[in-house]
Amino acid sequence: MALSLMAVALCGVIFWLLREPLAKSWRRRRLRSRAFPHEWREHIRRRFPYFSALPADLQIKLKRLVQVFLAETPFIGCNGLAITDEIRVTIAAQACLLLLNRRTDYFPNLREVLVYPDRFIVDREAANPTGLVTRQRQVLSGESWLTGQVILSWQDVLEGAARPGDGHNVVIHEFAHQLDQETGPANGAPLMFGKLRYARWADVLGREYAELQQRASTGQESLISDYAATSPAEFFAVVSELFFERPRDLASEHPSLYAQFSDYYRVNPLSW
């Protein structure tokens, strides 16, 4: 009798623990099964030409990811910007590129996307080597916060989407930071499974990052911008932009780096 009661109690605990993940999985399957709205297809076609280059199976996957992303992610307009489906879909389509073939819980820490009409100003405190703290004003096109907010300039979103081959995309950049922040502050080492994968990642990215810092310090030109040399987190985000937007250049000049990003994102843009 006691064992039966314990078994019932254990089943109840298991059901309680699995209830929310099962409900989320069912809800997402239902969302992915719905027809993709015609108006959303038109927004993607008009604003995101990169989409047409994707193979047909990845186009379908991307649309399904977008459906879930938009159902679960609040968008907030800032400085008078009214959020429309055009804004939501254009941002979601670019963000979901990072999820295409990955086993993922979407962006699990993401709470909301804040969108400004144009670049926005932030004031930051910074300490110099002597410890003196000063307030600095920065004009930004995007930010990703550890607390789950992504902040974007709509004008920069449009420009990044309209020029898919220039290697600059603020949405890819900031949502790469979100992936990097899944386990804590961004450090250029996003969540992966397997010690061997982490070891290879650390070896290749550590070497490439050090080489970029050396080139930047001597003023040498590089496919990877000097901004990527400011921290491992920025290196990961900048190279993510290049991986999706300039894959042939990245594979040609940095084949080991390209291979690591292809393994991480589970796609090969060279084949598109």
Image: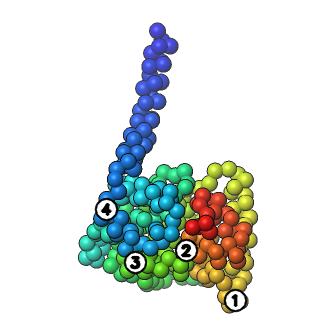
Residue, disc 4? 38
User: In x, y percent, where is residue 76?
Assistant: 31, 67
Q: Residue at x 31, y 62 (%)?
A: 38
Q: Kindly state the secondary structure of the residue where label 4 is placed.
A: helix
Q: Residue furthest front?
A: 56
Q: Nearer the viewer, mark 2 or mark 4?
A: 4
Q: Residue at x 66, y 84 (%)?
A: 222
Q: Is residue 83 left or right of residue 191?
A: left
Residue, disc 3? 158
The answer to which quarter of the image holds residue 161 is: bottom left
The disc label shown at residue 245, or none:
2
Q: CA distance from mark 4 to mark 1?
A: 48 Å
User: In x, y percent, where is residue 272?
Assistant: 57, 67
Q: Is residue 98 left or right of residue 31?
A: right
Q: CA distance from mark 3 to mark 4?
A: 20 Å
Q: Residue at x 47, y 13 (%)?
A: 4
Amino acid tagged 1? Gln
Q: CA distance from mark 2 to mark 3?
A: 15 Å
Q: Nearer the viewer, mark 1 or mark 3?
A: 3
Compared with 182, 121 (above or below) is below
Amino acid tagged 2? Glu
Foreground pick, 169 / 39? 39
Q: State which tag comes first along the sequence, 3 or 4.
A: 4
